Image: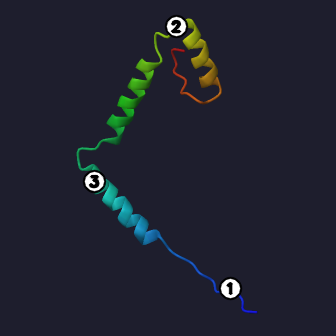
Amino acid sequence: MTSPVPFTIDLTAHEGARLAAVLAALGSHWDPTEIYTGEAEAHRMLYTRLEPDQQAAYDALSAAGVLPAFPEH
């Protein structure tokens, strides 16, 4: 009976090329801080002025860690 031959693949170079292609596709105008700030503001606006039953559902989901908790809640 023959023993298995060790087989390894190093994807480091491929991952570097993939990351470079993603960043090139995003372009120089991409600002992750601005995007994150915009997303946080959109979430805050989405979960404000909820009706009481919606607020109760939101509170339960945010307590469970499913939805983000905002300071005003």
Does residue 27 appear left or right of residue 51 in this picture? left
The residue sitting at 34% across, 36% down in the picture is 35
Task: Identify the secondary structure beneath mark 1.
Answer: loop
Pointer 2 local density, CA inside 10 Å: few below 14, some 14–19, many at least 20: few
Q: Which mark sits nearer the N-terminus, 2 or 3? A: 3
User: Which residue matches tag 2?
Assistant: 51
The residue sitting at 59% across, 24% down in the picture is 62
The residue sitting at 39% across, 30% down in the picture is 39
Q: Report the label total.
A: 3
Pointer 1 local density, CA inside 10 Å: few below 14, some 14–19, many at least 20: few
User: Which residue matches tag 1?
Assistant: 4
The residue sitting at 47% across, 70% down in the picture is 11
User: Which residue matches tag 3?
Assistant: 25
Discs 1/3, front: 1
Determine contact: label 1, label 3, CB under 8 Å: no
Q: The residue under label 2 is which amino acid type? A: Glu
Which residue is farthest bottom? 1
Distance between the alpha carbons at the discs numbered 1 and 3: 41 Å
Task: Identify the secondary structure beneath mark 3.
Answer: helix
Location of the N terminus (image quadrant): bottom right
